[in-house]
Amino acid sequence: MPEVFCSDEQNAIAVDLPKWRALALAALMAEGVRGACELSLYFVDEETIAELNAEHMGKIGPTDVLSFPLDGVEIAEAQGPGAISAGPARPHPDHDDVPTLLGDVLVCPAVAVRQFETHAGTLDDELALLVVHGVLHVLGYDHEIESDTAHMRERELGILKEHHWRGEAPAAFRQEHDE
């Protein structure tokens, strides 16, 4: 079973760590991630995310979410007869029982507060979207070209419907995301 480590490193917005940890784990499982692997999910302040945005993305100012997949980690398709799950691919057998580190997702709740009304509709839905979006980036999803964007949005919506809303997306979200 994958493990998700969560930490609230900011104090602007109250964050329900168990809720977001469960959603991040559900996103991993929905994408077929199995086995001994770890993901870190951090909720950070604007200063921290702005510094990382400048350092790693070359962009000025705070952003809503950043993902840092670890190099060399790929999600393997289920292999062999009777295989029922996928998991992190390793370049060689690992006999020391050390989990594969998938990467880090950093979410900035203060930025989410400013954009939720025109983005996801509610703060809860915005944070959910950012968590899922970040997890998908760690797993290799991207939105640099239109076809990749459509596929990533489809997966986000599917995971949110199943694990966040437990059914239909709210009207505000459907309208904003052209469902």
Image: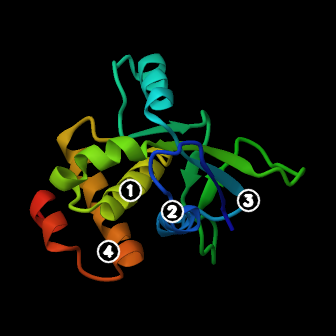
Q: Earlier in the sequence, mark 1 or mark 3?
A: 3
The circle drawn on residue 161 is 4
Which percent across, then down, holds residue 15? 50, 58
Q: Earlier in the sequence, mark 3 or mark 4?
A: 3
Amino acid on which disc 3 is placed:
Ala
Residue under circle 1?
127
The circle drawn on residue 36 is 3
Question: Circle 3: is it few (<14), some (14-19), or many (20+) Cα within 10 Å?
Answer: some
Q: Residue 171, located in which quarter of the rendered image?
A: bottom left
How much space separates mark 3 and mark 4, taking CA atoms? Answer: 26 Å
112 to the left or right of 66: left
The circle drawn on residue 32 is none
The vertical placement of 58 against 133, above or below, is above
Q: Nearer the viewer, mark 1 or mark 4?
A: 1
Which percent across, then down, holds residue 16? 52, 63
The vertical placement of 161 against 95, above or below, is below
Badge 2 element: helix
How much space separates mark 1 and mark 2, taking CA atoms? Answer: 8 Å
The reply to whether the C-beta atoms of the residues labelled 3 and 2 are less than 8 Å apart is no
Badge 1 element: helix
The reply to whether the C-beta atoms of the residues labelled 4 and 2 are less than 8 Å apart is no
The reply to whether the C-beta atoms of the residues labelled 1 and 4 are less than 8 Å apart is no
Q: Earlier in the sequence, mark 4 or mark 2?
A: 2
Question: Circle 1: is it few (<14), some (14-19), or many (20+) Cα within 10 Å?
Answer: many
In this rendering, does residue 155 appear at all? Answer: no
Which residue is located at x 47 percent, y 64 percent?
Answer: 27
Amino acid on which disc 2 is placed:
Trp
The reply to whether the C-beta atoms of the residues labelled 1 and 2 are less than 8 Å apart is yes
Q: Nearer the viewer, mark 3 or mark 2?
A: 2
Badge 4 element: helix
Q: Residue 143, located in which quarter of the rendered image?
A: top left
